Each structure stands twice: as structure tokens, then as C-alpha cells.
Image (spheres, grey):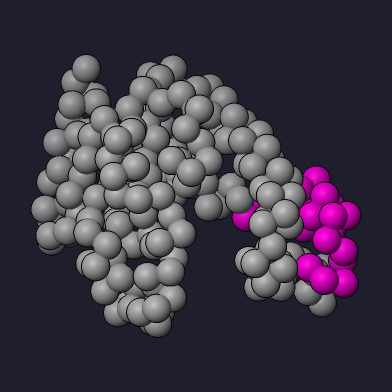
């Protein structure tokens, strides 16, 4: 089994790469989905978040996590953010290990793609056979956030500034996929990578 770590800054096109690899036969694990699952209703993660921050502050009327309220609490409080990360990150890791075991059970020679936005920031110690980085200039990513997600330019620049730098991501990359041109150009690079992966 080969395990690929796929990362990139916000709006860098990593989901386009992940979806293409999945369509070619890879098993895709999405860290953002695992993070949602980690605090889903009834989960141990949500119970810990409620215990730490208080049900009246972080749950909505349906008993689900109110992400906006929690975000407001941790956004300007580094201690609260650290406490949240200490709850969520181990839960995400546990769910990832389970997904990996499931993939291995499906096929001993599977190619698994773990799409993880914060690989540089929070998962450098994880072992991957290959790290793939979706790479596009910050100004282009700002443009995408404004045009495709309706984000204000100042918010877009702030989000990008709060992530690892392009240089930091490039430093851990085994493969860079240039996503600054057309989608067809991106997909052609992914197809070439896939040919290499299954040909090894």
C-alpha cells in the first residue's frame, strides 16, 4: 500500500487533485471530513469540546456543534485554540488510522491519498510514501477565494497569511503540482503522477 500526503494552501486546487486521483483508483481520505466526524453528535470528541467550553456556548438548538460560535471563542484566544486542537487532532488521527486500516483491508496494494490542508502546520511527523503539494501563487488563490467563494479580499489574504508559507510547503514536497494554469493542465500532471505511482 502506498500512502500519499496531499496538501496545499487554501484555494490551491488540492481537492481537484484529490478527486482526480480518486477517479483514477486511489482511496481518498479527507482530513476536513475527519475533523467534522471527530466532533459529530454523539462522538467522544464533541463530548470533550462541550466539557471544555460549555454546552451553552458551543452547541446549537439541535445539539450539534455551532462552528461559528466555537470559532469566535478560539479565534483570538491562543490558549482556547490549543485546548481545542488537543481534543480534535488526536480524534482526527484515530479516525485516519481506522480509515487507513479499512483501505488496507480492501486492497493490500491500494494507493491512499490523505488530503490534509494542515500537513505542514500539524502533521509533519506523519509518515507518507510521497508528499504532493498543490502549488499556486498567493495572489491567484486570493482571486479564487474572492470570485468562487465570495470572500472579501482582506479576509482571503488573512486566511492565507495564517497558513504555512508556500516556501514551507515546497520544502516538504516530493511532487509539486502547478495549479496556476487551466484545470486541464493540472489534471494532466495528476495523470502523469498516477502513471508513475501504479507503474512503480
Tell me if residue 31 comes above or below residue 147 in the rendering: above
Residue 79 point in image, percent of width and height: 72, 54
Tell me if residue 169 comes above or below residue 57 in the rendering: above
Residue 59 point in image, percent of width and height: 80, 69
Depth check: 103 or 165 in front? 165
**Which residue lies at the image location 23% right of the left edge and 34% below the top edge?**
175
- Give the quadrant of residue 68: bottom right
Residue 39 inside the magenta-drawn segment = yes
Number of marks drawn: 0
Residue 28 point in image, percent of width and height: 42, 41
- Give the quadrant of residue 109: top left
**Which residue lies at the image location 43% right of the left edge and 69% below the top edge?**
158
Tell me if residue 25 comes above or below residue 67 in the rendering: above
Residue span colored magenta: 36-58
Q: Is residue 23 visible?
A: no
Q: Is residue 78 visible?
A: yes
Most common SS among magenta residues:
helix
**Which residue lies at the image location 23% right of the left edge and 56% below the top edge?**
136
Q: Look at the image and tell me in which quarter the C terminus lies.
A: top left
Amino acid at each position: 500500500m502506498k500512502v500519499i500526503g496531499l496538501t496545499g494552501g487554501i484555494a490551491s486546487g488540492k481537492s481537484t487533485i484529490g478527486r482526480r486521483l480518486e477517479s483514477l483508483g486511489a482511496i481518498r481520505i479527507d482530513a476536513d471530513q475527519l475533523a467534522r466526524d471527530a466532533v459529530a453528535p454523539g462522538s467522544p470528541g464533541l463530548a470533550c469540546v462541550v466539557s471544555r467550553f460549555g454546552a451553552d456556548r458551543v452547541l446549537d438548538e439541535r445539539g450539534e456543534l455551532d462552528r461559528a460560535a466555537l470559532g469566535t471563542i478560539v479565534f483570538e484566544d491562543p490558549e482556547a485554540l490549543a485546548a481545542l486542537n488537543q481534543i480534535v487532532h488526536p480524534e482526527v488521527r484515530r479516525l485516519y488510522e481506522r480509515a487507513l486500516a479499512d483501505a488496507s483491508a480492501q486492497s493490500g496494494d491500494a494507493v491512499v491519498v490523505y488530503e490534509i490542508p494542515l500537513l505542514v502546520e500539524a502533521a509533519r511527523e506523519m509518515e507518507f510514501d510521497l508528499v504532493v503539494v498543490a502549488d499556486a501563487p498567493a495572489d491567484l488563490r486570493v482571486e479564487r477565494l474572492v470570485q468562487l467563494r465570495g470572500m472579501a479580499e482582506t479576509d482571503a489574504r488573512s486566511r492565507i497569511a495564517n497558513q504555512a508559507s508556500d516556501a514551507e510547503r515546497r520544502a516538504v514536497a516530493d511532487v509539486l503540482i502547478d495549479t496556476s494554469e487551466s484545470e486541464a493542465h493540472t489534471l494532466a500532471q495528476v495523470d502523469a503522477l498516477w502513471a508513475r505511482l501504479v507503474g512503480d
